[in-house]
Image: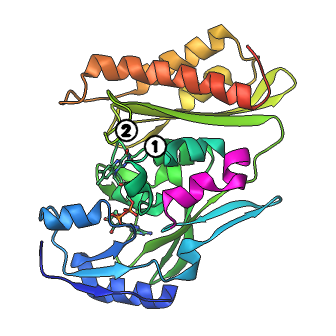
């Protein structure tokens, strides 16, 4: 482990100033399940941890039927997936957060940390993308919102500028006749990195899909939102054929690599299988049977 300093600000302004003055070797500390491992293995040069957990907004979980759900960036997964509102109105978020690591990891790991670590395989990101999540960012130039689908720019890289951090993630209120779902494939039940993951969200008007969002992860340098898959679904009734077209679009959009967890061929196949499964589950949650 490196020698490093630790500070625990209680306001957003204080955290921004500490991060801005700390420069490139100052890092936000949320649950620490990624960054402490990276510091111990000297994968990142860090000399200051700015622990954001004492800032009230980073631990909030609030829902308003008109505006939606706000999840503090440092709120641990177990609080998210045990929340009744999340379970009933945002089950895709519960799907993803209840599977990150194991119970011990879920006691610390946060959505903000999963997003800002910006791993291509981060499990919560596809769920946040299809739920139209927006990262609420604070920094030296004030506040801004970044759609989650535009947040990651490469493996371990994202749009945050020096001194900026994510305060919370906001999700719009779910529309009537809508549903969303998330799934991943790993060779065992838990404590592994996704070989592939996917999420889908559907909104129906009558029998027609009025809006669709589809995202895949672990099959490209960043999690991907799939415009072609959404196009294959929108404006049509949901059928085995439209689902197959969206699944084909997913495997075509995937740009996977071969590694110890899976091959290019397997990951392309998984992208289509997981998109199909999440579409069927999203439809079921929207009250539709195929
Ligand atoms: C045993 C084990 C199993 C795991 N299993 C999974 C898994 O199944 N799926 C999965 O996706 N991940 C998994 N992970 C990775 C990790 O647990 C998740 O990425 C987790 O969500 C990170 O959240 P955290 O709060 O611990 O982040 P931290 O480790 O505190 O931070 C991660 C990175 O993001 C930065 N950061 C954190 N919060 C913010 C913020 N609000 N604003 C700006 N920057 C910020 C930090 O500086 C750091 O660079 C696992 C890790 C371990 C050790």
160, 167: nearer the viewer: 167
| Quadrant (top left, top right, bottom left, bottom right) of the N terminus | bottom left
| Mark 2 or 1, nearer chain start | 1
Residue at the image point whose x is 32% and y is 61% from the top? 33
In terms of secondary structure, where does tag 2 sit?
Answer: loop
Q: CA distance from mark 2 to mark 1?
A: 7 Å
- Residue range in magenta is 75-89
Q: Which residue is mark 2?
A: 190
Residue 110, magenta (yes or no)? no
Magenta stretch, main secondary structure, is helix
User: Taking the image as drawn, is residue 196 in sight?
Assistant: yes
Q: Is mark 2 within 8 Å of ligand 1?
A: yes
Pointer 2 with pointer 1, Cβ within 8 A: yes
Q: Which residue is mark 1?
A: 99
In terms of secondary structure, where does tag 1 sit?
Answer: loop
Q: Is residue 274 above or below residue 189?
A: above
On the image, the x and y values in percent for residue 126 come to 50, 42
Residue at the image point whose x is 56% and y is 22% from the top? 277
Name which quarter of the figure residue 62 lies in.
bottom right
On the image, the x and y values in percent for residue 7 come to 33, 88
Q: Is mark 1 within 8 Å of ligand 1?
A: yes
User: Taking the image as drawn, is residue 213 in sight?
Assistant: no
């Amino acid at each position: 482990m490196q020698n490093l300093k630790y500070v625990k600000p209680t306001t957003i302004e204080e955290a921004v100033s500490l991060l801005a003055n700390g420069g490139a070797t100052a890092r936000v500390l949320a649950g620490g399940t990624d960054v402490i491992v990276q510091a111990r293995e000297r994968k990142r040069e860090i000399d200051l941890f700015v622990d954001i957990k004492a800032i009230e907004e980073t631990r909030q979980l609030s829902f308003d039927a008109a505006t939606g759900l706000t999840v503090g960036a440092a709120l641990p997964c177990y609080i998210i997936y045990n929340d009744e509102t999340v379970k009933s109105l945002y089950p895709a978020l519960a799907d993803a957060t209840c599977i990150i690591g194991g119970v011990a990891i879920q006691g610390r790991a946060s959505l903000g940390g999963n997003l800002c670590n910006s791993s291509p395989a981060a499990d919560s990101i596809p769920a946040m993308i299809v739920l139209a999540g927006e990262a609420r960012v604070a920094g030296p130039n004030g506040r801004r919102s970044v759609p989650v689908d535009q947040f990651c720019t490469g493996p371990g890289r994202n749009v945050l500028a020096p001194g900026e951090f994510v305060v919370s993630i906001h999700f719009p209120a779910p529309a009537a006749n809508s549903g969303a779902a998330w799934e991943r494939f790993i060779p065992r039940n838990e404590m592994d990195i996704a070989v592939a993951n996917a999420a889908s969200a559907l909104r129906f008007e009558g029998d027609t899909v009025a809006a669709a969002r589809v995202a895949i992860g672990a099959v490209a340098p960043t999690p991907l939102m799939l415009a072609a898959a959404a196009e294959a679904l929108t404006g049509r009734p949901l059928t085995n054929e439209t689902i197959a077209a969206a699944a084909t679009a997913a495997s075509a959009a995937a740009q996977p690599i071969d590694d110890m967890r899976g091959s290019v061929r397997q990951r392309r196949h998984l992208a289509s299988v997981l998109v199909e499964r999440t579409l069927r589950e999203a439809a079921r949650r929207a009250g539709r049977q195929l």
